Image (cartoon, grey):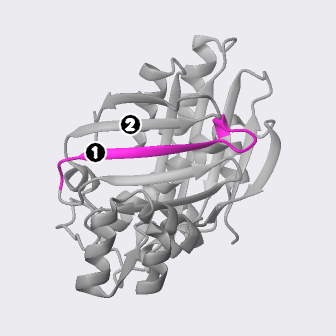
Amino acid sequence: MSDYLIKAIDKTKNLRLLTISAKNLVQEAQTRHNTWSAASAVLGRTLLAGELLAGAQLTDQEELTIRLLGNGPVGPTIVTAKSDLTVKGYVKNPHIALPAKEGGHIDVKKAVGQGWLEVTKDLGLKEPYTGQVPIVSGEIAEDIAYYLTKSEQIPSAVGLSVFVNPNNTIGEASGFMLQALPGASDSLITKTIERIDHLPALSTAFLAGMTPEELAESILGNDCKILTRENVTYKCDCSKEKYRQILATLKTSQIETMIKEDHGAELTCNFCGNKYQFTEKELRDIIQ
């Protein structure tokens, strides 16, 4: 199955839903960062959350960054998603695997720990806007829902799932984000939440072949309307020129030390692992 996100609305036009399937996207991240099971689950869920938030909130050339700043063993997790539904991310400590919880599930809560969830939006204004809430769960989906409800006053329900195979490859990655629009009645919201509560586990459903469209119908009803279907991709926009610009912000003495002691410089992108080499001549050109 290809990776894509759909947007749907219920028949009353009072509930908005985004659903996503992104196994290949999360697999790309796992391969690039060589993440182990717990780190894969944390990074994968945060990547899915980034795509769902981007799909719901961004237009034109806007972007947002999620910072999951927990004190658990994976350390900080950073994800940036753009309005074109490209996303990139990394965890500080990729080689984290923890004992499974009862039922064999990855202990994402323990991997994340306690701390803060920050969402920064660059909407093309003078200054980006950052919303911050405490990590209330550590399972990430509940934390994103809490952020939307408390920081943006949008009542929301979020589900995120990443199934990691025994060999650390990704078996499935899926999720949804349900938002109540201003006209939604309490009874409509309650009925829809009951549907969500009776869903099978996302990992079980998507491993068995469920699609984002079928998930939308299971949550909103068979009479829901699918509005759009858009591809989602793991993509880093780093380049040697961007790193040259970063080097140009350093003090001349720092670059001179690189030339004298290291005879050049190598910079590695945290988001994708690409390495950029700068020769002595290239470093001298920067400080001239």
Which image quarter is the N terminus in? bottom right
- Secondary structure of the residue carrying numbered label 2: strand
Residue 70 lies in the magenta-colored region: yes
Instruction: Decide which of 136, 159 is in the foreground and name it.
Output: 136
Instruction: Decide which of 132, 164 is in the foreground and name it.
Output: 132
Q: Position of residue 104 (x, y in %)?
A: 27, 66
**Residue plotted at (69% across, 31% down):** 16
- Which residue is most to the front? 288
Residue 220 lies in the magenta-colored region: no
Q: Position of residue 143 (x, y in %)?
A: 37, 36
Above or below — where is 83 with respect to 261? Answer: above
Tell me the residue that label 1 is attached to.
Answer: 69
Q: Position of residue 220 (x, y in %)?
A: 69, 35
Residue bounds of the magenta highlight: 56-72
Tell me the residue that label 2 is attached to.
Answer: 118
Q: Quadrant of residue 30?
A: bottom left
Q: Quadrant of residue 136?
A: top left
Kind of residue at badge 1: Leu
**Residue plotted at (43% across, 77% down):** 283
Number of numbered discs visible in the structure rendering: 2
Circle 1 Cα neighbour tier, 10 Å, few/some/many (<14 / 14–19 / ≥20): many
Q: CA distance from mark 1 to mark 2?
A: 8 Å
Instruction: Decide which of 32, 269 is in the foreground and name it.
Output: 269
Mark 1 or mark 2, earlier in chain: 1
Can residue 166 be seen here? The reply is yes
- Secondary structure of the residue carrying numbered label 1: strand
Kind of residue at badge 2: Glu
Q: Position of residue 224 (x, y in %)?
A: 78, 36
Can residue 201 be seen here? The reply is no
Q: Are marks 1 and 2 in contact (CB under 8 Å)?
A: yes
**Residue plotted at (50% across, 33% down):** 157
